Amino acid sequence: MFNFRYRMRYILSGFVAACLAFDVMASQLSVPITYISNRVEPSYAINDLLVRPENAGIAGAELGIADSNTTGKFLDQRFVFLSIDLAKQKNSKINWSEILPAPTLLLVDLDTETLFELLAYNSGLVAPHLIINVSAHSNVLRQTICSEYVFHTAPSYAQITDALGQWLLVKRLDNIFLIDGDTPQDTEWLESFKRTAKRYKLTISTEKKWSFNSDLRRTVGQEIPLFTQTARPYDVVVVADTHQRFGQYIPFNTYYPRPVVGSAGLVANTWHPSIEQWGAKQLQHRFMTLHDRYMQHHDYDSYVAIRAIAYAVQQTTSIDPSVLSSFLRGDKFQLAAYKGRKLTFRNYNGQLRMPIELTHPLGLVSRSPQVGFMHPLSELDTLGFDKSEVCQ
Amino acid sequence: MRPSILFRPSTKGLLLAIVLTTGFISTLSASTELAYVTNEKDNSISVVELDTFTVIRTIPVGDRPRGFIFNHDQSLAYICASDSDRIQILDVATDKIVGELPSGEDPETIALHPNGTTIYTANEDDALLTVIDIPTAQVISQIDVGVEPEGLAVSPDGSKLVVTSETTNMVHWIDTATNTNYANSLVGARPRSAVFTQDNQQLWVSSEIGGQVTVFNVADQSVKHEITFAVKGIHKDRVQPVGIVLMKSKPLAFVALGPSNHVAVIDTNTMQVLEYLLVGRRVWQLAFNQDESLLLTTNGISGDISIIDTDKLKTIKSVKVGRYPWGISVKYL
């Protein structure tokens, strides 16, 4: 009941704001933001405990809109949220110009292939859309797409693996047993981790592909020790299993009693329900009130994207994608996003600079960049790609 | 007449009671100034004696205590028990919670009107400012403000109230006579504290993520100065202004700079930063003692308070208190 009451309040206040906007405020700036997704069911069997909530990502955008409208009412700005689910469109070929007739502000939650299609379409437009990628982690996107209209609030795999690599180095866990989950995304993750290992001089002493020829539910206690047995001990097991098919069985079952990091055990991402510093507790409260569940990293990435647009609109009083894009990449952009320091976009590839949280399932362990990792511009640039690695 | 056997032990008991009570009262009405510090994660208040610099008492209070102020004669204190959704009233003579005020949800900071009977609190979760009448313990009004309202200040003449909203990046100006919001000013990202000058002419506002302090002309809400900071050896992103105090006896302002672990000293005539004083980790709120010879800082992460000698501009001592010390006020002699 409690939560329902508050949910209603949010919805009603939005409704009242909308009515007011319609009636009296002719000078009001209306800011439509569109969320495009194509939620394709993965072909892999996923542990029930790890299935993404139905509204993952979009839920964060909704909270971002509510927050932005609370601010907007003092500035005569009204943020309107629209969503398009491409998975519901049966046509195999997407007609982008039909879906997006006018220049718009977009949050995209798409698979890499569709996203590249959209980016290619966008780069051919005279008046392109502003695109913020809120879900794809692909490194290729960050290294090869340098359109000034494209931004990423989702972290790259490189930011994630660098965050882990710094922690491993600080903990002196530099002899690694690496497990490859053998899906295309796992391969991408693994490539990224190998780049990190090279940067930080971490030794991958063993690398093995996981093969699904046993029933883990019954024999996990026998299978994993055998799989992770080596002649000489390693310091840590790193698992690349982005689809969560087997990684959760690795901790506590390794041949040597060693920590597990990567996609199971200690994981690196932008957000976790246990984060409460730097005002995060308030954000977690608001999210829980609105959606009746904990805020996950997908939600955070979308929330931050909306807040970034809203801040740019607040400062420029424009909704023109080109004006907003150049503001987002500029020096004046500064986003307070519950991370204890201002977040900005890398102007060379549109990636959001941000600290990465290292968590276990129930709590925060650490946060990267770790102390002592330096960069001439910002310590946050020790995570992910630097200018010289992009669009060369 | 020989007293009855029954009477004697009770006389002793009475004497004992008198001795104990006197002892008890003498510890409470201390001969020195006392700093009251709310410990956000310990649900308690640490009371620190300012001549010996030791914690002499720890008072259990409601959940997640943050904002803390005294009433004008310092007989009572008001505490924001954020997670208990109430303002608690502490009787300073007995260290007992003697009452509560309705606060709305999640009160974070409080400010008292000069009339002594109206108290304002920012409801961080609900984007509201609540106006409370103390004698009747009634909510007079709730005013819509931006997301995560935080810093509150009432002008010394009592005519104006401002509240900052952290996620909306604004200062909301409110007329205390009508409880209406008459102006809004955008400031740097994540504004925290607001303080009026004694002459009611200026308003100082800190922006934690923006890394600056904005000084407004109160009359027309125009920006008079923007003060920025540069602490040697610390990345500018970690220089995050939070608490501000303005000295009455000298033209000096002190600004707590959060995770840079420094307090900036500003000459209010020239608006130049004179010095940066090293204090504990994640310095947050600030308070003077009565004659302003000492400045106290709460340091969230190191769980202590630092004591600054304002003549020498030197940090002279740190005192361990509870976990995440947040608010601080000094009980004068």
Image: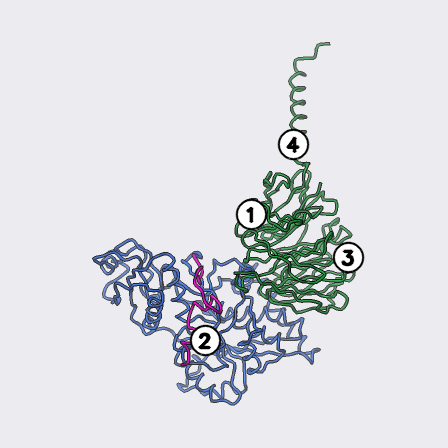
Instruction: Indicate which label's residue lies in the foreground, 2 or 1.
Output: 1
Residue B24: image tag: 4
**What residue type is disc 1 on?**
Asp
**What residue type is disc 2 on?**
Asp
Tell me the crowding category of disc 1: few under 14, some 14 to 19, or many 20 or more residues within 10 angstroms, Cα based: many
Residue B158: image tag: 3
Classified by dominant secondary structure, the portion drawn in magenta counts as loop
Residue B266 lies, in percent from the top left, at 66, 59
* In this picture, residue B142 sits left or right of residue A150: right
Q: Is B21 or B312 nearer to us in this picture?
A: B312
The chain carrying label 2 is A
Residue B304: image tag: 1
Q: Is residue A19 above or below residue A223?
A: below
Instruction: Indicate which label's residue lies in the foreground, 4 or 1.
Output: 1
Q: Is B225 or B133 nearer to us in this picture?
A: B225
What secondary structure is marked by label 3?
loop
Q: Distance between the residues labelled 2 and 4?
A: 65 Å
Q: Mark 2 points at which residue?
A: A109
| Chain B: colour as depicted | green
